[in-house]
Amino acid sequence: MNSSSSFLRTIRGVGGLAVALSISGLATGPLAAQQPASPTAAVTAAHAPLRILWIGNSYTYVNDLPRTLTLLSLAAGENRVPAITTVLRGGQFLRGHMARKDMAALMAKGWDYVVLQDQSLAPIQQPDTVLHYGTQLGTMAKQAGAKVLLYVTWPRRDTPQTAGTILSVYTRLAQSLGATLVPVGPAWMAMRDEAPATDLYIEDGSHPSPIGTYIAASVFYGVLYGKSPVGLAPQAFSVRGNRYVADTLPMAVMPLTLSPSDVAAAQRAAERALKSPSR
């Protein structure tokens, strides 16, 4: 993927493509191809959930990013709302996920999207392992018919200069896989311009505060639906009732009560990253 191109233009068809594939897949074979799918079947496919498998760690489950994304999609009135399954474990690397004995079976469950997120320092300290295991997992997902989304994370609070390295490694992985970048880290960097006083981190200087999670959800929304998140209705999200596939240690799970001004700034930051992640 060419990171210098307009990211919104690149992803414009991502959500729509999922719908088109679902509809066209209703009729297969030489005879069926000559007959249009019934209107009822087409409507059902157009409103089917987006089945997403999320593979990662605490950067995903702190404040429950997947559920926040689902709530954003519901609030926006999207026809296809994410139905999330997560494989999450604190501090886990992609190589650890790849070692799961049930990973091949899990990948084969008919996902629309598979999200891959490596340990936060891996792109900086072990870029080759990110590329190696990301390629293995991504190839497995694509062979099962899923589209691959690469969750570009953010730098630690005290090392903002590593943001470019993180993006570069995920960009290389995206190019080799034909995957789609989700530039959350670049959106965090843009938020520093939009609202410099807003703290995106919790006390450890690593994991996201509620507004940090909201930015991430806004970027994922833009990628999935090919739309700008600017203008989505500000609202508070209550995060409860987490369900995970893998054993996890949820931390800092709290209601995401966000001010309208922070939400507006987060939406602008997300849009900037979607348009130009390499800024």
Image (cartoon, helix red, strand yellow):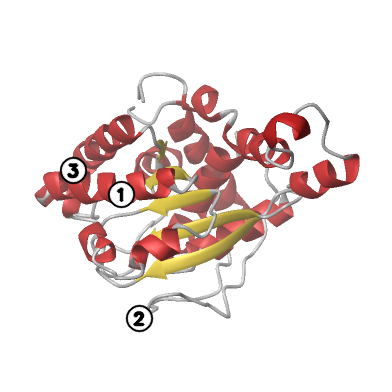
Q: Which residue is mark 2?
A: 249
On the question of residue 124 being in view, the answer is yes
How far from the left and from the top, in percent, is residue 260?
Answer: 63, 53
**Reading the chain from its start, which is encountered first: label 2 or label 1?**
1
Closer to the camera: disc 3 or disc 2?
Answer: 2
**Which picture quadrant has residue 187?**
top left
User: Would residue 157 appear left or right of 77 to someone viewing this image?
Assistant: left
Q: CA distance from mark 3 to mark 2?
A: 27 Å
Labels 3 and 2 touching (C-beta < 8 A): no
Residue under label 1, please give it: 154
Mark 2 touches mark 1? (CB < 8 Å) = no
* Location of residue 50 with respect to 203 vertically, above or below: above
Name which residue type carries label 2: Leu
Residue at horizontal 24 percent and vertical 41 percent from the top: 163
Mark 1 vs mark 3: which is more N-terminal? 1
Give, as a three-letter code, the residue at label 3: Thr
10 Å crowding of disc 3: few (<14), some (14-19), many (20+)? some
